[in-house]
Amino acid sequence: MRLHDIWAMEEMTGFSLKKEKLQKGMPLFEFNLTENRFSGHAGCNQINGGVSVVGNKIAFGDLVGTLMACPNMKIEKAVIEALNQKTVTYSIDKMKLTLVSGKTKMVFKKID
């Protein structure tokens, strides 16, 4: 299994994720390693930027995103804060992608 794919968030440290409480549903990330790009949304706002992958580390470049005001911004802010740490550790096991940034762990499932 490769990182180059589309992933939907299932879990995040400190949050009970419910797609009906998020404007666009569960946060969704797409990694395009051919172009070293990352895009998706954090539950409300679109985000994208450059990425570099070395070993089990993903280095995020400056993130660009839309600035819509959404009813529930807690998860959105936590996702952006985790990615703004610049480098996260990742692992893929049994169709699940785990990103770890400091004390924050995010688990995603591969989608078609």
Image (cartoon, rainbow, N blue to C red):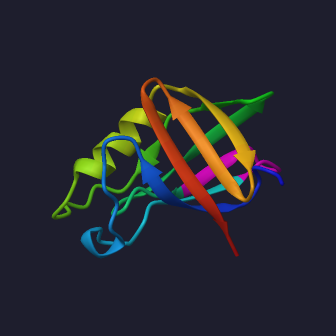
Left or right: residue 106 compared with residue 3: left
Residue 100's spot in the image, x, y percent?
54, 33
Left or right: residue 36 compared with residue 27: right
Task: Name the residue furthest front.
Answer: 94
Q: Nearer the viewer, residue 46 or 97?
A: 97
Residue 71 included in the magenta stretch of the image:
no
Tag count: 0
Q: Quadrant of residue 43?
A: bottom left
Taking the spot 32% from the left edge, 51% from the top edge, the residue there is: 76
Q: Nearer the viewer, residue 40 or 112?
A: 112
Q: Nearer the viewer, residue 35 or 53?
A: 53
Compared with 86, 20 (above or below) is: below
Residue 34's spot in the image, x, y percent?
83, 50
Taking the spot 40% from the left edge, 51% from the top edge, the residue there is: 65
Residue 4's spot in the image, x, y percent?
77, 54
Compared with 30, 13 (above or below) is: above
Quadrant (top left, top right, bottom left, bottom right) of the C terminus = bottom right
Residue 38 included in the magenta stretch of the image:
yes
Q: Quadrant of residue 87?
A: top right
What are the residue bounds of the magenta stretch? 32-39
Taking the spot 57% from the left edge, 55% from the top edge, the residue there is: 108
